[in-house]
Image (spheres, rainbow, N blue to C red):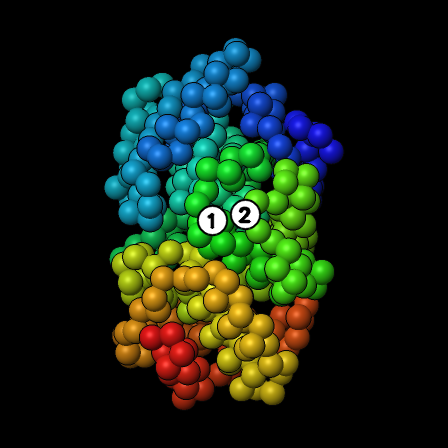
Amino acid sequence: MGRNSAVVVPVDVSPSYQVRVGSGTLVEVAGLVAEATVAVVSDDRVAALYAQQLLETLEGAGKRCRLYTVAPGEASKTLAPYERLLRALATDGFDRGSAVVALGGGVIGDLAGFVAASFMRGIACYQVPTTLLAMVDASVGGKTGLNLPEGKNLVGAFWQPRAVVADVDLLRSLPARTFRQGAVEAYKHGLLADEGLWRRFQRGDITPDLEPLAMSAFVASAVRVKATVVAQDTFETGNRAHLNLGHTLGHALEAVSSHSLGHGDAVAYGLLFAGLLATGRGWRDLSDELAAFLEWVSPDPLPTPTFDQLEPFLDRDKKNLSGQRRFVLLRDVGDPVVVDDIDRDAQHSAWQALVRSYG
């Protein structure tokens, strides 16, 4: 695979679409966008790096484009920026034949995707992820959403993109720490369904300075796991919930810290928490491997609220049913399961173990 030659991962939903992973693939976006009028949504930091190049390729293909930016960070994944974008599209004459292109990380993908899902009751959306986390996870599968003070991703819709273009060259602008945070989702995918991918992390093969061919192969392998699960369960009524491994505590930590703890860091702690719960049930003890991975991620310090302070956020987790907390755990690598019978004492004990080691 050379420059501009993408690894193509199909996402077999209805309608189906492709995730195109490669070096220099940003130029492919214009050829994939069928609509004549395009709203490019980004954040100020990403737009300064890549928006001009994207706009030039779109306009060179005869598209009428307008760029809209928000501030970087989770504060933009809320109702006020969402409303501002909707009103801007209405004011600027976008219609049902227009498209939204999300240029950025997971926050932009979720925000712009929800704008596309709800403007005029749904217009075309294309995802152009610029972070590792967004490439391997957030851009694929059609989940869009906003945060409320009461919890993460409590507002949103399933709205599949028409295409995803992941240009691994864009990862070069990421600090190494941000790359490692994004790698948490790829590691999770390995735990769920690709032991070979998981073992690459165990061997230390995954680094920010992978050459483009190897980086594209790595990203594509993680995307395949997500695409396979999404194709089997588009609307998360069954096994798609497995993709929330580590996210129950992770989302609670993000919310209780007012999002000062980043998503990758929070999920890394959440993976170890899930490992502790699984070990308590007599399943494979992965705590040493998970702790070593956590050390590699080098997350920000663990917030240490009391368990009582965490519980309201755990109780609002989207996986819960009929008031029961549900956790995704691993019986073994490649063998995830959703459980709803973990008593509060076991949850509290796992939290205390986490605090003793990292608080």
Per the image, label 1 sits on a secondary structure element best described as helix
| Residue 182 location (% of width, % of height) | 49, 52
| Drawn side of residue 356 relative to residue 128, left or right | left
The picture places residue 109, in percent across and down from the top left corner, at 45, 41
From the viewer's perspective, tell me whether residue 311 is left or right of residue 189. Answer: left
Q: Is residue 177 left or right of residue 310?
A: right
Could you tell me how many numbered marks the image carries? 2
Q: Would residue 154 be seen by someone viewing this image from the given angle? A: no
In front here: 233 or 30? 30
Quadrant placement of the C terminus: bottom left
Residue 312 at x, y percent in the picture: 31, 72
* Residue at mark 2: 208
Q: Is residue 217 above or below residue 91?
A: below
Callout 2 crowding tier (Cα within 10 Å): few <14, some 14–19, many ≥20: some
Q: Residue at x 60, y 29 (%)?
A: 25
For the residues labelled 1 and 2, say whether their Cβ atoms are less than 8 Å apart. Answer: yes
Mark 1 lies on residue: 176
Q: Residue at x 57, y 37 (%)?
A: 168
**Crowdedness near tag 1: few (<14), some (14–19) or many (≥20) residues, C-alpha within 10 Å:** some
Q: Earlier in the sequence, mark 1 or mark 2?
A: 1
Viewer-closest of 209 and 22: 209
Q: Amino acid at mark 2?
A: Pro
- Amino acid on which the number 1 mark rests in the picture: Ala
- Residue 282 higher or lower than 83, as above or below: below
Q: From the viewer's perspective, is 65 left or right of 35?
A: left
Residue in the picture at 41% in, 62% down:
299
Question: Rounded to the nearest whole Å, what is the CA distance between mark 1 and mark 2?
Answer: 6 Å
